[in-house]
Image (tube, helix red, strand yellow):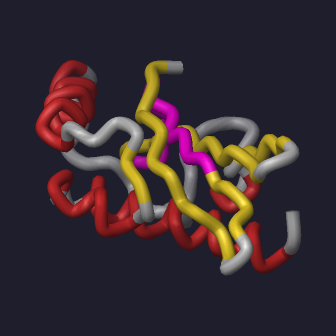
C-alpha cells in the first residue's frame, strides 16, 4: 500500500464519519464508489439504535480527542489489512471520545486508474 493509498483511505473514513456525525445516512453512497451494504435505511436503524441504546447523541468525527486509556490519536486506529488485490480498512466508532461497539469496515481494490472505495459494513465489535 502506498502513502497515497493510505491517504485516500483515511479521507474516505473522514468523509463517512462526517456523514454519520451529521446523521445524513442517505449520503453514505456519495463517500464511496460502491456500497456492499447498500440499504441506508437499515444502516440508519442500526447506527441510530446503537446511539439510542447507549444514551449517545452522535458519533464523533475523525480526530476528536479521546477520553479512553491508553489515549492515542485517532489516525493511528485506522487498521489496515493488505491482500493481493487491495486492502481493507477498519475504524472503531466513538461518541463523546468514548469507544462504542461498532466498527466501520471498508474495502479498497487496486484498479488501473486508482482505488475503488467500497463500503462493506458497520459491524458490532
Task: Return the x and y of residue 12 as percentages of the image width and height.
Answer: 52, 66
- 114 within the magenta span: no
- 100 within the magenta span: yes
User: Where does the N terminus fall, quadrant-wise?
Assistant: bottom right
**For residue 121, what is the image quadrant?**
top left
Describe residue 38's horizontal placement relative to residue 112 as left or right. left
**For residue 10, what is the image quadrant?**
bottom right
Q: Main secondary structure of the magenta part?
A: strand
In the foreground, 33 or 59: 33
Task: Return the x and y of residue 54 as percentages of the image width and height.
Answer: 26, 23
In the foreground, 27 or 21: 27
In the foreground, 17 or 119: 119
Task: Return the x and y of residue 125 as percentages of the image width and height.
Answer: 53, 20
Residue at 60% over, 47% down: 107
Task: Return the x and y of residue 105 as percentages of the image width and height.
Answer: 54, 39
Residue at 43% over, 63% down: 32
The tally of labels here is 0
Describe residue 28's horizontal placement relative to residue 83 as left or right. left
Describe residue 12's horizontal placement relative to residue 41 as left or right. right
Residue at 84% over, 42% down: 83
Q: Which region of the structure is painted magenta?
A: 96-107
Depicted 7 relative to depicted 94: above or below: below
Residue at 30% over, 59% down: 29
In the foreground, 20 or 40: 40
Depicted 39 relative to depicted 72: above or below: above
Amino acid at each position: 500500500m502506498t502513502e497515497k493509498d493510505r491517504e485516500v483511505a483515511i479521507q474516505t473514513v473522514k468523509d463517512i464519519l462526517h456523514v454519520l456525525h451529521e446523521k445524513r445516512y442517505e449520503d453514505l453512497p456519495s463517500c464511496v464508489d460502491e456500497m456492499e451494504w447498500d440499504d441506508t435505511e437499515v444502516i440508519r436503524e442500526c447506527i441510530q439504535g446503537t446511539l439510542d441504546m447507549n444514551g449517545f447523541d452522535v458519533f464523533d468525527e475523525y480526530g476528536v480527542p479521546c477520553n479512553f486509556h491508553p489515549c492515542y490519536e485517532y489516525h493511528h486506529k485506522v487498521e489496515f489489512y493488505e491482500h493481493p488485490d487491495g486492502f481493507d480498512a477498519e475504524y472503531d466508532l466513538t461518541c463523546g471520545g468514548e469507544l462504542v461497539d461498532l466498527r466501520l469496515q471498508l474495502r479498497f481494490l487496486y484498479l488501473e486508474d486508482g482505488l475503488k472505495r467500497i463500503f462493506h459494513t458497520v459491524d458490532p465489535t
